[in-house]
Amino acid sequence: MRTISTALALLTLLLCTTPLRAVAAEELTLLATVTRVVNLPMLVGLRLLEREDGITVRVKDLRSPESVMLAVIEGQGQVGTGFAPFYPAIEKNAPVRGVMELSRPEFVVMAKKEIANVKALHGVRLASHSPKATTQSLLEFYLKSQPGVRPNVVFIPEGSPARAEALLRGAVDAAAFDLTAAQVVEERAPGKFHILIDFTDQPVSSSSLVVNNDFARTRPEVVQKLVRRLLQSYREGARDPKFWVRERGDALKEVDDARLERQLRALVKIFDLNGGLARMTGPGAAENLAFQVATGNLTGPTSKWRPEQFFDTAPLEAVLKDIGKR
Amino acid sequence: MVPALRAASVVGFLLLWEWAARVPISFNFPSPWATVTALLALLRSGALLEATAISLQSLLLGFGAAVALGVPAGLLMGVARPVGRVGRVYLDLLIALPTAALVPLVILSFGINILSSAVIVFVFSAPFVTMNAYGGVRDVRPRLVEMARAFDASWWQLFSRIVLPSALPMILAGIRYALSRAFVGLIVAELLLSPFGLGRLIMTARSMFEHDRMFATVLWTLMFAGAALAAVARLEARLLRWRA
Protein backbone atom coordinates (compact mmCIF):
# COMPACT_ATOMS: atom_id res chain seq x y z
CA MET A 1 0.00 0.00 0.00
CA ARG A 2 2.81 2.36 1.00
CA THR A 3 4.68 1.60 -2.22
CA ILE A 4 1.56 2.35 -4.27
CA SER A 5 1.02 5.67 -2.42
CA THR A 6 4.65 6.65 -2.92
CA ALA A 7 4.47 5.74 -6.61
CA LEU A 8 1.22 7.72 -7.02
CA ALA A 9 2.71 10.72 -5.26
CA LEU A 10 5.81 10.59 -7.45
CA LEU A 11 3.67 10.23 -10.58
CA THR A 12 1.51 13.20 -9.55
CA LEU A 13 4.62 15.27 -8.86
CA LEU A 14 6.06 14.29 -12.23
CA LEU A 15 2.82 15.12 -14.06
CA CYS A 16 2.57 18.48 -12.32
CA THR A 17 6.13 19.64 -12.81
CA THR A 18 7.21 18.21 -16.17
CA PRO A 19 4.83 20.09 -18.48
CA LEU A 20 5.44 23.37 -16.65
CA ARG A 21 9.18 22.97 -16.98
CA ALA A 22 8.85 21.98 -20.62
CA VAL A 23 6.65 24.99 -21.39
CA ALA A 24 9.05 27.32 -19.62
CA ALA A 25 12.00 25.84 -21.48
CA GLU A 26 10.39 26.02 -24.88
CA GLU A 27 8.83 29.47 -24.94
CA LEU A 28 10.42 32.82 -25.54
CA THR A 29 8.76 36.19 -26.07
CA LEU A 30 10.62 38.72 -28.15
CA LEU A 31 9.39 42.30 -28.16
CA ALA A 32 10.11 44.41 -31.19
CA THR A 33 9.11 47.66 -32.79
CA VAL A 34 6.97 47.38 -35.91
CA THR A 35 8.24 44.69 -38.30
CA ARG A 36 10.35 46.11 -41.13
CA VAL A 37 12.64 44.60 -43.74
CA VAL A 38 15.63 45.29 -41.49
CA ASN A 39 14.14 42.92 -38.88
CA LEU A 40 13.79 40.05 -41.32
CA PRO A 41 17.22 38.43 -40.72
CA MET A 42 16.39 38.43 -37.00
CA LEU A 43 12.97 36.88 -37.65
CA VAL A 44 14.56 34.19 -39.81
CA GLY A 45 16.99 33.49 -36.93
CA LEU A 46 13.99 33.05 -34.62
CA ARG A 47 12.46 30.57 -37.07
CA LEU A 48 15.73 28.64 -37.02
CA LEU A 49 15.58 28.65 -33.23
CA GLU A 50 12.10 27.13 -33.37
CA ARG A 51 12.99 24.56 -35.97
CA GLU A 52 16.44 23.51 -34.79
CA ASP A 53 16.12 23.93 -31.03
CA GLY A 54 12.41 23.42 -30.48
CA ILE A 55 12.01 26.79 -28.73
CA THR A 56 8.71 28.48 -29.54
CA VAL A 57 9.17 32.19 -30.09
CA ARG A 58 6.35 34.69 -29.84
CA VAL A 59 7.11 38.03 -31.45
CA LYS A 60 5.07 40.95 -30.13
CA ASP A 61 5.19 44.29 -31.89
CA LEU A 62 5.05 47.45 -29.80
CA ARG A 63 4.76 50.95 -31.15
CA SER A 64 7.88 52.64 -29.87
CA PRO A 65 11.42 51.55 -28.91
CA GLU A 66 11.00 52.90 -25.38
CA SER A 67 7.86 50.76 -24.91
CA VAL A 68 9.92 47.73 -25.95
CA MET A 69 12.59 48.61 -23.40
CA LEU A 70 10.04 49.11 -20.62
CA ALA A 71 8.34 45.80 -21.42
CA VAL A 72 11.66 43.90 -21.34
CA ILE A 73 12.62 45.66 -18.09
CA GLU A 74 9.27 44.64 -16.56
CA GLY A 75 9.73 41.06 -17.80
CA GLN A 76 6.72 41.09 -20.13
CA GLY A 77 9.09 39.60 -22.70
CA GLN A 78 12.46 38.05 -22.06
CA VAL A 79 14.22 39.67 -25.01
CA GLY A 80 13.69 42.71 -27.18
CA THR A 81 15.16 44.96 -29.81
CA GLY A 82 17.05 47.81 -28.18
CA PHE A 83 17.43 51.05 -30.09
CA ALA A 84 18.56 54.45 -28.74
CA PRO A 85 16.42 54.27 -25.53
CA PHE A 86 18.48 51.23 -24.43
CA TYR A 87 21.30 53.53 -23.29
CA PRO A 88 19.33 55.98 -21.10
CA ALA A 89 17.49 52.98 -19.64
CA ILE A 90 20.80 51.49 -18.50
CA GLU A 91 21.77 54.87 -17.06
CA LYS A 92 18.60 54.67 -14.94
CA ASN A 93 19.72 51.21 -13.70
CA ALA A 94 17.42 49.12 -15.90
CA PRO A 95 18.01 45.40 -15.27
CA VAL A 96 18.81 44.55 -18.91
CA ARG A 97 21.93 43.95 -21.00
CA GLY A 98 22.73 43.90 -24.70
CA VAL A 99 24.01 40.48 -25.79
CA MET A 100 24.49 41.04 -29.51
CA GLU A 101 24.34 43.82 -32.07
CA LEU A 102 21.35 43.39 -34.35
CA SER A 103 22.41 45.98 -36.90
CA ARG A 104 24.54 49.01 -37.61
CA PRO A 105 22.65 52.14 -38.75
CA GLU A 106 20.35 51.49 -41.72
CA PHE A 107 19.55 55.16 -42.19
CA VAL A 108 20.31 57.68 -44.89
CA VAL A 109 19.29 61.27 -45.56
CA MET A 110 17.65 61.59 -48.93
CA ALA A 111 17.04 65.00 -50.47
CA LYS A 112 15.66 66.66 -53.56
CA LYS A 113 18.15 66.68 -56.43
CA GLU A 114 18.41 70.50 -56.16
CA ILE A 115 19.98 70.10 -52.72
CA ALA A 116 23.35 69.13 -54.15
CA ASN A 117 25.45 69.04 -50.99
CA VAL A 118 25.21 69.00 -47.21
CA LYS A 119 25.71 72.79 -46.93
CA ALA A 120 22.52 73.27 -48.95
CA LEU A 121 20.58 71.53 -46.15
CA HIS A 122 20.79 74.76 -44.15
CA GLY A 123 17.30 76.12 -43.54
CA VAL A 124 15.44 73.45 -45.53
CA ARG A 125 12.72 71.24 -44.06
CA LEU A 126 14.26 67.93 -43.06
CA ALA A 127 12.03 65.16 -41.67
CA SER A 128 13.37 63.02 -38.85
CA HIS A 129 11.73 60.46 -36.54
CA SER A 130 11.49 62.06 -33.10
CA PRO A 131 13.71 63.66 -30.46
CA LYS A 132 16.24 61.11 -29.17
CA ALA A 133 15.40 58.46 -31.78
CA THR A 134 18.34 56.67 -33.42
CA THR A 135 17.76 58.55 -36.70
CA GLN A 136 17.78 61.90 -34.91
CA SER A 137 20.83 60.97 -32.82
CA LEU A 138 22.78 60.08 -35.97
CA LEU A 139 21.66 63.28 -37.64
CA GLU A 140 22.63 65.48 -34.67
CA PHE A 141 25.98 63.71 -34.40
CA TYR A 142 26.66 64.23 -38.10
CA LEU A 143 25.57 67.89 -38.08
CA LYS A 144 28.05 68.63 -35.29
CA SER A 145 30.77 68.06 -37.90
CA GLN A 146 29.08 70.53 -40.29
CA PRO A 147 29.30 73.98 -38.68
CA GLY A 148 26.77 76.45 -39.99
CA VAL A 149 24.44 73.80 -41.40
CA ARG A 150 21.15 73.98 -39.54
CA PRO A 151 18.23 72.35 -41.30
CA ASN A 152 14.70 73.01 -40.10
CA VAL A 153 14.07 69.57 -38.57
CA VAL A 154 10.43 68.48 -38.42
CA PHE A 155 9.49 65.26 -36.66
CA ILE A 156 7.31 62.58 -38.20
CA PRO A 157 7.28 59.71 -35.72
CA GLU A 158 5.17 57.46 -37.93
CA GLY A 159 8.15 55.51 -39.32
CA SER A 160 10.30 55.55 -42.44
CA PRO A 161 7.42 54.98 -44.95
CA ALA A 162 5.61 58.09 -43.65
CA ARG A 163 8.75 60.21 -44.01
CA ALA A 164 9.35 58.81 -47.51
CA GLU A 165 5.77 59.71 -48.42
CA ALA A 166 6.25 63.24 -47.05
CA LEU A 167 9.38 63.64 -49.21
CA LEU A 168 7.64 62.29 -52.31
CA ARG A 169 4.68 64.64 -51.83
CA GLY A 170 6.91 67.67 -51.32
CA ALA A 171 5.89 68.21 -47.68
CA VAL A 172 9.62 68.27 -46.82
CA ASP A 173 12.79 68.87 -48.83
CA ALA A 174 14.85 66.10 -47.25
CA ALA A 175 14.19 63.20 -44.93
CA ALA A 176 16.10 60.71 -42.81
CA PHE A 177 14.80 57.16 -43.22
CA ASP A 178 15.96 53.60 -43.71
CA LEU A 179 17.55 52.17 -46.85
CA THR A 180 14.35 50.30 -47.75
CA ALA A 181 12.39 53.54 -47.84
CA ALA A 182 15.19 55.11 -49.92
CA GLN A 183 14.77 52.33 -52.49
CA VAL A 184 11.01 52.90 -52.57
CA VAL A 185 11.52 56.65 -53.16
CA GLU A 186 13.95 55.90 -55.99
CA GLU A 187 11.51 53.42 -57.57
CA ARG A 188 8.55 55.80 -57.36
CA ALA A 189 10.34 58.96 -58.47
CA PRO A 190 13.48 57.94 -60.37
CA GLY A 191 16.12 60.65 -60.56
CA LYS A 192 14.19 63.22 -58.48
CA PHE A 193 15.91 62.54 -55.16
CA HIS A 194 19.36 61.38 -54.10
CA ILE A 195 21.10 60.05 -51.01
CA LEU A 196 22.89 63.00 -49.47
CA ILE A 197 24.21 61.46 -46.24
CA ASP A 198 24.82 57.75 -45.70
CA PHE A 199 24.88 56.69 -42.05
CA THR A 200 25.34 52.99 -42.80
CA ASP A 201 29.12 53.21 -42.52
CA GLN A 202 29.07 54.78 -39.03
CA PRO A 203 31.01 52.60 -36.56
CA VAL A 204 28.15 52.46 -34.04
CA SER A 205 25.37 50.03 -33.19
CA SER A 206 21.89 51.00 -34.31
CA SER A 207 20.10 48.23 -32.44
CA SER A 208 21.06 45.50 -30.00
CA LEU A 209 19.43 42.32 -28.80
CA VAL A 210 18.48 43.20 -25.23
CA VAL A 211 17.86 40.52 -22.60
CA ASN A 212 16.22 40.81 -19.20
CA ASN A 213 18.90 40.18 -16.53
CA ASP A 214 16.79 37.64 -14.60
CA PHE A 215 16.24 35.63 -17.74
CA ALA A 216 19.92 35.82 -18.75
CA ARG A 217 20.94 34.60 -15.31
CA THR A 218 18.46 31.73 -15.10
CA ARG A 219 18.45 30.59 -18.74
CA PRO A 220 21.92 31.28 -20.17
CA GLU A 221 21.65 28.27 -22.51
CA VAL A 222 18.54 29.74 -24.21
CA VAL A 223 20.25 33.11 -24.68
CA GLN A 224 23.25 31.34 -26.21
CA LYS A 225 21.03 29.32 -28.57
CA LEU A 226 19.23 32.51 -29.60
CA VAL A 227 22.51 34.31 -30.37
CA ARG A 228 23.77 31.28 -32.30
CA ARG A 229 20.67 31.11 -34.53
CA LEU A 230 20.66 34.83 -35.21
CA LEU A 231 24.31 34.66 -36.24
CA GLN A 232 23.55 31.62 -38.40
CA SER A 233 20.81 33.60 -40.14
CA TYR A 234 23.09 36.62 -40.62
CA ARG A 235 25.90 34.53 -42.08
CA GLU A 236 23.75 32.48 -44.44
CA GLY A 237 21.81 35.55 -45.56
CA ALA A 238 24.96 37.59 -46.13
CA ARG A 239 26.23 34.81 -48.41
CA ASP A 240 22.95 34.81 -50.34
CA PRO A 241 20.02 37.12 -49.37
CA LYS A 242 17.67 34.67 -51.11
CA PHE A 243 18.04 32.61 -47.94
CA TRP A 244 16.18 35.26 -45.92
CA VAL A 245 13.49 35.55 -48.59
CA ARG A 246 13.02 31.78 -48.70
CA GLU A 247 13.00 31.29 -44.92
CA ARG A 248 10.84 34.26 -43.96
CA GLY A 249 7.66 32.26 -43.31
CA ASP A 250 4.66 34.59 -42.97
CA ALA A 251 6.74 37.70 -42.32
CA LEU A 252 6.45 40.40 -45.00
CA LYS A 253 4.53 38.00 -47.23
CA GLU A 254 2.91 40.96 -48.95
CA VAL A 255 6.27 42.02 -50.44
CA ASP A 256 7.22 40.50 -53.76
CA ASP A 257 10.21 38.08 -53.51
CA ALA A 258 12.41 39.83 -56.07
CA ARG A 259 11.82 43.24 -54.52
CA LEU A 260 12.47 41.94 -51.01
CA GLU A 261 15.70 40.33 -52.16
CA ARG A 262 16.79 43.64 -53.69
CA GLN A 263 16.04 45.48 -50.45
CA LEU A 264 17.85 42.89 -48.34
CA ARG A 265 20.88 42.92 -50.64
CA ALA A 266 21.21 46.68 -49.95
CA LEU A 267 21.02 46.00 -46.20
CA VAL A 268 23.56 43.17 -46.01
CA LYS A 269 26.40 45.52 -45.02
CA ILE A 270 24.71 46.57 -41.77
CA PHE A 271 24.61 43.05 -40.29
CA ASP A 272 27.81 42.13 -38.50
CA LEU A 273 28.74 38.48 -38.96
CA ASN A 274 30.44 38.49 -35.55
CA GLY A 275 27.40 39.91 -33.76
CA GLY A 276 28.98 43.34 -33.28
CA LEU A 277 31.52 42.09 -30.74
CA ALA A 278 33.95 44.79 -31.90
CA ARG A 279 31.47 47.48 -30.78
CA MET A 280 30.67 45.79 -27.46
CA THR A 281 34.25 45.50 -26.17
CA GLY A 282 37.49 47.51 -26.25
CA PRO A 283 38.01 50.67 -28.30
CA GLY A 284 34.98 49.96 -30.52
CA ALA A 285 32.70 49.97 -27.48
CA ALA A 286 34.30 53.20 -26.23
CA GLU A 287 33.55 54.80 -29.59
CA ASN A 288 30.00 53.45 -29.50
CA LEU A 289 29.42 54.90 -26.03
CA ALA A 290 31.10 58.19 -26.94
CA PHE A 291 28.54 58.51 -29.74
CA GLN A 292 25.71 58.00 -27.23
CA VAL A 293 27.20 60.70 -24.97
CA ALA A 294 27.67 63.09 -27.91
CA THR A 295 24.04 62.71 -28.95
CA GLY A 296 22.75 63.14 -25.40
CA ASN A 297 21.44 59.61 -24.94
CA LEU A 298 23.93 59.22 -22.09
CA THR A 299 25.21 61.90 -19.75
CA GLY A 300 28.92 62.62 -19.90
CA PRO A 301 31.77 62.33 -19.50
CA THR A 302 32.33 59.22 -21.62
CA SER A 303 35.00 58.00 -19.21
CA LYS A 304 32.39 57.19 -16.56
CA TRP A 305 30.90 54.45 -18.73
CA ARG A 306 32.28 50.94 -19.07
CA PRO A 307 31.10 48.56 -21.83
CA GLU A 308 30.19 45.84 -19.30
CA GLN A 309 27.54 48.15 -17.82
CA PHE A 310 25.69 47.83 -21.14
CA PHE A 311 26.80 44.57 -22.69
CA ASP A 312 27.15 40.98 -21.61
CA THR A 313 29.37 39.44 -24.27
CA ALA A 314 29.69 36.00 -22.65
CA PRO A 315 26.97 34.28 -24.78
CA LEU A 316 28.28 35.84 -28.01
CA GLU A 317 31.89 34.97 -27.23
CA ALA A 318 30.93 31.38 -26.42
CA VAL A 319 29.08 31.07 -29.74
CA LEU A 320 31.93 32.67 -31.71
CA LYS A 321 34.40 30.30 -30.04
CA ASP A 322 32.27 27.46 -31.30
CA ILE A 323 31.47 28.60 -34.84
CA GLY A 324 34.54 30.76 -35.45
CA LYS A 325 34.91 34.46 -36.20
CA ARG A 326 34.58 35.95 -39.65
CA MET B 1 -17.79 68.30 5.55
CA VAL B 2 -17.17 68.69 1.78
CA PRO B 3 -13.82 70.52 2.19
CA ALA B 4 -12.69 67.83 4.63
CA LEU B 5 -13.69 65.08 2.21
CA ARG B 6 -11.89 66.87 -0.62
CA ALA B 7 -8.72 67.24 1.46
CA ALA B 8 -8.92 63.58 2.51
CA SER B 9 -9.26 62.45 -1.11
CA VAL B 10 -6.18 64.50 -2.12
CA VAL B 11 -4.14 63.12 0.78
CA GLY B 12 -5.33 59.59 -0.06
CA PHE B 13 -4.36 60.01 -3.70
CA LEU B 14 -0.90 61.35 -2.78
CA LEU B 15 -0.32 58.47 -0.36
CA LEU B 16 -1.34 55.95 -3.01
CA TRP B 17 1.00 57.61 -5.51
CA GLU B 18 3.88 57.59 -2.98
CA TRP B 19 3.25 53.90 -2.32
CA ALA B 20 3.26 53.19 -6.08
CA ALA B 21 6.64 54.94 -6.36
CA ARG B 22 8.13 53.08 -3.40
CA VAL B 23 7.10 49.60 -4.59
CA PRO B 24 7.71 50.68 -7.50
CA ILE B 25 4.80 49.57 -9.68
CA SER B 26 6.88 50.09 -12.83
CA PHE B 27 10.44 50.95 -13.80
CA ASN B 28 11.56 54.38 -12.62
CA PHE B 29 8.05 55.32 -11.45
CA PRO B 30 8.41 58.84 -9.95
CA SER B 31 7.17 59.88 -6.52
CA PRO B 32 4.91 62.93 -6.07
CA TRP B 33 7.87 64.84 -4.61
CA ALA B 34 10.15 63.95 -7.58
CA THR B 35 7.37 65.02 -9.96
CA VAL B 36 6.86 68.37 -8.25
CA THR B 37 10.63 68.96 -8.16
CA ALA B 38 10.84 68.21 -11.90
CA LEU B 39 7.86 70.50 -12.52
CA LEU B 40 9.58 73.39 -10.72
CA ALA B 41 12.82 72.73 -12.62
CA LEU B 42 10.95 72.73 -15.94
CA LEU B 43 9.20 75.98 -15.01
CA ARG B 44 12.47 77.60 -13.94
CA SER B 45 14.22 76.60 -17.18
CA GLY B 46 11.41 78.12 -19.21
CA ALA B 47 10.98 74.89 -21.24
CA LEU B 48 7.46 74.29 -19.94
CA LEU B 49 6.19 77.80 -20.60
CA GLU B 50 7.72 77.82 -24.07
CA ALA B 51 6.08 74.46 -24.88
CA THR B 52 2.76 75.68 -23.43
CA ALA B 53 2.86 78.76 -25.63
CA ILE B 54 3.34 76.56 -28.71
CA SER B 55 0.56 74.15 -27.71
CA LEU B 56 -1.74 77.06 -26.93
CA GLN B 57 -1.53 78.19 -30.57
CA SER B 58 -2.89 74.85 -31.87
CA LEU B 59 -5.48 74.74 -29.10
CA LEU B 60 -6.81 78.26 -29.70
CA LEU B 61 -6.85 77.77 -33.45
CA GLY B 62 -8.53 74.35 -33.38
CA PHE B 63 -10.90 74.91 -30.48
CA GLY B 64 -11.72 78.46 -31.59
CA ALA B 65 -12.68 77.14 -35.01
CA ALA B 66 -14.72 74.36 -33.38
CA VAL B 67 -16.79 76.91 -31.42
CA ALA B 68 -17.00 79.44 -34.25
CA LEU B 69 -18.23 76.86 -36.76
CA GLY B 70 -19.78 74.26 -34.48
CA VAL B 71 -22.29 76.47 -32.66
CA PRO B 72 -23.81 78.06 -35.81
CA ALA B 73 -23.86 74.64 -37.50
CA GLY B 74 -25.73 73.13 -34.54
CA LEU B 75 -28.18 76.04 -34.40
CA LEU B 76 -28.83 75.73 -38.13
CA MET B 77 -29.43 72.00 -37.77
CA GLY B 78 -31.87 72.65 -34.94
CA VAL B 79 -33.78 75.42 -36.70
CA ALA B 80 -33.91 73.85 -40.19
CA ARG B 81 -35.18 70.32 -39.50
CA PRO B 82 -34.22 68.74 -42.88
CA VAL B 83 -30.64 70.02 -42.43
CA GLY B 84 -30.69 68.56 -38.91
CA ARG B 85 -31.84 65.15 -40.09
CA VAL B 86 -29.06 64.94 -42.70
CA GLY B 87 -26.37 66.53 -40.52
CA ARG B 88 -27.14 64.28 -37.53
CA VAL B 89 -25.87 61.22 -39.41
CA TYR B 90 -22.52 62.90 -40.10
CA LEU B 91 -22.27 64.11 -36.51
CA ASP B 92 -22.81 60.59 -35.18
CA LEU B 93 -20.14 59.30 -37.53
CA LEU B 94 -17.71 62.07 -36.53
CA ILE B 95 -18.21 61.32 -32.85
CA ALA B 96 -17.46 57.63 -33.42
CA LEU B 97 -14.52 58.37 -35.74
CA PRO B 98 -11.16 56.86 -34.64
CA THR B 99 -9.48 60.22 -35.10
CA ALA B 100 -5.99 59.08 -34.12
CA ALA B 101 -5.95 56.71 -37.11
CA LEU B 102 -6.36 59.70 -39.44
CA VAL B 103 -3.20 61.42 -38.25
CA PRO B 104 -0.98 60.39 -41.23
CA LEU B 105 -3.65 61.65 -43.64
CA VAL B 106 -3.81 64.97 -41.82
CA ILE B 107 -0.03 65.38 -42.22
CA LEU B 108 -0.24 64.78 -45.96
CA SER B 109 -3.23 67.08 -46.41
CA PHE B 110 -2.25 70.02 -44.21
CA GLY B 111 1.55 69.73 -43.96
CA ILE B 112 3.77 69.35 -40.92
CA ASN B 113 2.90 72.43 -38.93
CA ILE B 114 0.71 73.90 -36.22
CA LEU B 115 -2.24 73.84 -38.63
CA SER B 116 -2.23 70.02 -38.65
CA SER B 117 -2.41 69.91 -34.82
CA ALA B 118 -5.20 72.50 -34.94
CA VAL B 119 -7.12 70.32 -37.42
CA ILE B 120 -6.86 67.33 -35.06
CA VAL B 121 -8.01 69.50 -32.13
CA PHE B 122 -10.93 70.68 -34.27
CA VAL B 123 -11.95 67.14 -35.25
CA PHE B 124 -11.78 66.03 -31.60
CA SER B 125 -13.92 68.89 -30.28
CA ALA B 126 -16.21 70.29 -32.99
CA PRO B 127 -18.76 67.42 -33.13
CA PHE B 128 -19.56 67.86 -29.43
CA VAL B 129 -20.10 71.61 -29.75
CA THR B 130 -22.40 71.07 -32.75
CA MET B 131 -24.29 68.17 -31.17
CA ASN B 132 -25.07 70.13 -28.01
CA ALA B 133 -26.12 73.26 -29.90
CA TYR B 134 -28.42 71.10 -32.02
CA GLY B 135 -29.79 69.34 -28.94
CA GLY B 136 -30.29 72.70 -27.20
CA VAL B 137 -32.48 73.99 -30.02
CA ARG B 138 -34.44 70.72 -30.20
CA ASP B 139 -35.15 70.95 -26.47
CA VAL B 140 -36.70 74.43 -26.59
CA ARG B 141 -40.13 74.20 -24.93
CA PRO B 142 -42.83 74.23 -27.65
CA ARG B 143 -45.16 76.24 -25.37
CA LEU B 144 -42.71 79.15 -25.35
CA VAL B 145 -42.48 79.06 -29.14
CA GLU B 146 -46.30 78.93 -29.45
CA MET B 147 -46.67 81.82 -27.04
CA ALA B 148 -44.15 83.95 -28.98
CA ARG B 149 -45.95 83.18 -32.18
CA ALA B 150 -49.28 84.10 -30.55
CA PHE B 151 -47.78 87.49 -29.78
CA ASP B 152 -46.82 87.80 -33.45
CA ALA B 153 -43.05 87.59 -32.86
CA SER B 154 -40.88 87.83 -35.99
CA TRP B 155 -38.51 84.97 -36.92
CA TRP B 156 -35.55 86.91 -35.60
CA GLN B 157 -37.34 87.76 -32.33
CA LEU B 158 -38.31 84.12 -31.92
CA PHE B 159 -34.71 83.00 -32.47
CA SER B 160 -32.97 85.65 -30.39
CA ARG B 161 -35.47 85.87 -27.49
CA ILE B 162 -36.68 82.28 -27.18
CA VAL B 163 -34.54 79.73 -29.03
CA LEU B 164 -31.04 81.03 -28.29
CA PRO B 165 -31.54 81.72 -24.54
CA SER B 166 -33.22 78.32 -24.10
CA ALA B 167 -30.43 76.52 -25.95
CA LEU B 168 -27.64 78.44 -24.21
CA PRO B 169 -27.19 76.10 -21.18
CA MET B 170 -26.70 73.11 -23.48
CA ILE B 171 -24.44 75.07 -25.85
CA LEU B 172 -22.20 76.12 -22.96
CA ALA B 173 -22.14 72.61 -21.52
CA GLY B 174 -21.11 71.36 -24.98
CA ILE B 175 -18.33 73.94 -25.18
CA ARG B 176 -17.03 72.87 -21.77
CA TYR B 177 -17.04 69.19 -22.73
CA ALA B 178 -15.50 69.99 -26.12
CA LEU B 179 -12.70 71.90 -24.38
CA SER B 180 -11.69 68.78 -22.45
CA ARG B 181 -11.79 66.81 -25.74
CA ALA B 182 -9.66 69.53 -27.33
CA PHE B 183 -6.94 68.96 -24.73
CA VAL B 184 -7.01 65.21 -25.47
CA GLY B 185 -6.81 65.98 -29.19
CA LEU B 186 -3.94 68.38 -28.63
CA ILE B 187 -1.76 65.81 -26.88
CA VAL B 188 -2.70 63.07 -29.38
CA ALA B 189 -1.75 65.40 -32.24
CA GLU B 190 1.52 66.42 -30.63
CA LEU B 191 2.51 62.86 -29.84
CA LEU B 192 1.43 61.16 -33.06
CA LEU B 193 1.54 63.88 -35.65
CA SER B 194 4.72 65.82 -35.18
CA PRO B 195 6.10 66.52 -31.75
CA PHE B 196 5.47 70.17 -30.91
CA GLY B 197 4.91 71.89 -27.59
CA LEU B 198 3.86 69.85 -24.58
CA GLY B 199 3.68 66.62 -26.62
CA ARG B 200 7.32 67.03 -27.59
CA LEU B 201 8.34 67.51 -23.95
CA ILE B 202 6.44 64.34 -23.01
CA MET B 203 7.99 62.36 -25.87
CA THR B 204 11.56 63.50 -25.14
CA ALA B 205 11.23 62.72 -21.43
CA ARG B 206 9.72 59.30 -22.23
CA SER B 207 12.56 58.43 -24.65
CA MET B 208 15.14 59.27 -22.00
CA PHE B 209 13.26 57.40 -19.23
CA GLU B 210 13.01 60.69 -17.32
CA HIS B 211 9.62 59.73 -15.99
CA ASP B 212 9.61 62.48 -13.35
CA ARG B 213 9.79 65.09 -16.15
CA MET B 214 7.18 63.19 -18.15
CA PHE B 215 4.77 63.08 -15.18
CA ALA B 216 5.53 66.75 -14.46
CA THR B 217 4.52 67.70 -18.01
CA VAL B 218 1.36 65.60 -17.80
CA LEU B 219 0.54 67.16 -14.42
CA TRP B 220 1.09 70.64 -15.88
CA THR B 221 -1.19 69.79 -18.82
CA LEU B 222 -3.86 68.66 -16.35
CA MET B 223 -3.49 71.86 -14.34
CA PHE B 224 -3.65 73.90 -17.53
CA ALA B 225 -6.75 72.02 -18.71
CA GLY B 226 -8.32 72.32 -15.23
CA ALA B 227 -7.76 76.09 -15.21
CA ALA B 228 -9.23 76.46 -18.69
CA LEU B 229 -12.29 74.37 -17.77
CA ALA B 230 -12.78 76.36 -14.57
CA ALA B 231 -12.64 79.60 -16.59
CA VAL B 232 -15.31 78.29 -18.99
CA ALA B 233 -17.46 77.12 -16.04
CA ARG B 234 -17.19 80.62 -14.55
CA LEU B 235 -18.20 82.18 -17.85
CA GLU B 236 -21.09 79.72 -18.06
CA ALA B 237 -22.30 80.70 -14.57
CA ARG B 238 -22.09 84.38 -15.47
CA LEU B 239 -23.97 83.99 -18.75
CA LEU B 240 -26.69 81.89 -17.14
CA ARG B 241 -27.16 84.15 -14.11
CA TRP B 242 -30.61 85.09 -15.42
CA ARG B 243 -31.80 81.54 -14.73
CA ALA B 244 -31.18 81.81 -11.00
Image: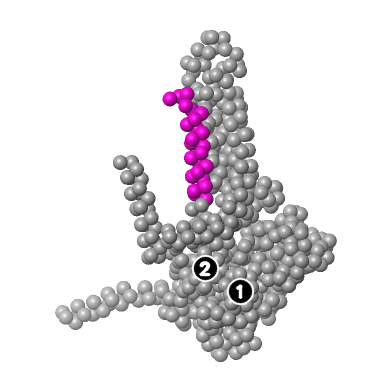
Q: Chain of mark 2?
A: A
Q: Which mark is residue B118?
A: none
Verify CB contact (< 8 Å) between mark 2 and mark 1.
no
Cα distance between the residues tagged 2 and 1: 19 Å
Q: Nearer the viewer, residue A136 or A2?
A: A136
Confirm whether circles 2 and 1 share one chain: yes
Label 2's element?
A: helix
Write down the residue under mark 2: A69
| Residue pictured at 64% horizontal, 80% vertical | A287
Image height check: is A114 above or below A276? above
Residue range corresponding to the magenta coloring: B221-244
Q: Nearer the viewer, residue A102 or B113?
A: B113
Q: Amino acid at mark 2?
A: Met
| Res A195 visible | no
Q: Quadrant of residue A138?
A: bottom right
Chain containing mark 1: A
| Residue at position x 49%, y 49% in the image | B222
Give residue A178's position: percent from left, percent from top.
68, 67
Which residue does the numbered mark 1 point to in the structure image? A293
**Is residue A52 depicted above or below B23 in this figure?**
below
Task: Where is residue A326? Give x, y as percent.
Answer: 64, 87
Tell me if residue B120 comes above or below residue A190 in the rendering.
above
